[in-house]
Amino acid sequence: MRDQEPAPTQRARRLTTKETAELLGVKPETVYAYVSRGQLTSRRGESTRGSTFDASEVEALARRNRRETTAGSGSGELSVRTRLTLIDDDRYFFRGVDAVQLASRHSYEEVAEWLWTGRLRPGTRFTAPKESLSAARKAMAALPELSSPIDRLRVAAVAAATADPLRYDLSEDSVLGAARTLIPTLAAALPLVRTTYVDGAPIAQRLWGRLTYWEPDEASLRVLDMALALLVDHDLAASTLAVRVAASARAHTYAAVSAGLGVLEGPLHGAASGLAHRMLLDVLDRGSAGAVVADELRSGRRVPGLGHRLYQGEDPRAQALFAALEDLPRAQPALMAARDVVATTARHTDLHANVDLALAVFTASFGMPAEAGETLFAVARTAGWIAHALEEYGERPLRMRPTGHYVGLRPPQPLPSASAAE
């Protein structure tokens, strides 16, 4: 005897793909990504086209997503799920692959593609459309002469957005298309110091001619390219979190990158390499690090280029760059100065070199301005910001909304008088 069919009211409620996406706050294609990862099960609808999903299962996933994205790791910090970068045991990985090995064997563009798509595209090059580049250069030309590199890049990003009528399309293909044109636009829109490239050249070669008068050789360009690849991403740094907040509000790619550039300009983030650059020049000028380190500490400042909250030992990015710089004769004086700084501070503190010190060695060795490291950092990290924005577009909108902990006067308070406002 066949089991009796459950009455319609007894059957589990089924949701369409559209309803499921709305409940989870994601795009329909993300719903199927949940299915492929085993987080949801789907079934072909009997009376509707497409797949259907068990309502209770969808609601459970929505609750789990809310807990995972707003709950901290026990320390009260925001925790965000990501498949991009892992930092563990003094190493870091892009999509599970050692980032230093990637940067040592592949170009900046290839590493960016790996971070965006999980696929390598050997020999890939990024090209700036004429409309985008023209808009960025015109906007930059209107800036005061003393504008900082980050000011220029931020203006270039906004100008490039105005030249892209598809900027509000947040689909993966559209975002990646914007990424592959925005990065070369940022690089090529900076003021030119010397011509070192032709159209279609790698990003490293385009940047070189905007940072120094020195003629590059293959080895020095390779170190610059490696530096860019090493800096592509570094988990949820302050600027990256700003990008994810913007993307959570569904700001378009250019606006999200602009948010990252705004945070990067802080002296505790992207500008740190400029401080290390000036310190190394001072060490080279004075002949030893002792007096320079003493001056830094006497002024109440930390010695720039040392220590990193995510690494117990030396920053792996610094290790890789120092090793590459060993092969550049021009870098030897600045390398010796950096080692002197590390050795001097090691007498009393256990601080290791970070990537800012390694960038400073590179920029100081080739007559680049102190802000050059910040420029390299910004252009390189744009790829990581876009990867995080793309990941965030697949999540529930506006999930980056912490609750404020009010500590002011408790209401009701009397209305302020005119004299109190003076």
Image: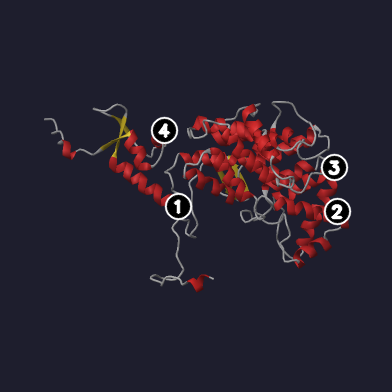
Estimate the spatial distance between the alpha carbons at disc 3 and disc 2, rounded to whole Å. 13 Å
Mark number for residue 401? 1
Estimate the spatial distance between the alpha carbons at disc 3 and disc 4, rounded to whole Å. 51 Å
**Precedes in sequence: disc 4 or disc 1:** 4
Vertical position of residue 359 compared to residue 30: above or below? below
Task: Say whether marks 3 and 4 touch (CB < 8 Å).
Answer: no
Nearer the observer, disc 1 or disc 3? 1
Estimate the spatial distance between the alpha carbons at disc 2 and disc 4, rounded to whole Å. 56 Å
**Precedes in sequence: disc 3 or disc 4:** 4
User: SS class of the residue under badge 4?
Assistant: helix
Residue that badge 2 annotates: 284
Q: Give residue 60's position: percent from left, percent from top.
A: 33, 46
Q: Give residue 331's position: percent from left, percent from top.
A: 82, 44
**Residue placed most toward the observer, 103 or 26:** 26
Which three-letter amino acid code belongs to the residue tagged 1? Arg
User: SS class of the residue under badge 1?
Assistant: loop
Residue at the spot 48% in from the left edge and 56% down from the top edge: 73
Label 1 neighbour load within 10 Å: few <14, some 14-19, many 20+: few
Label 3 neighbour load within 10 Å: few <14, some 14-19, many 20+: some
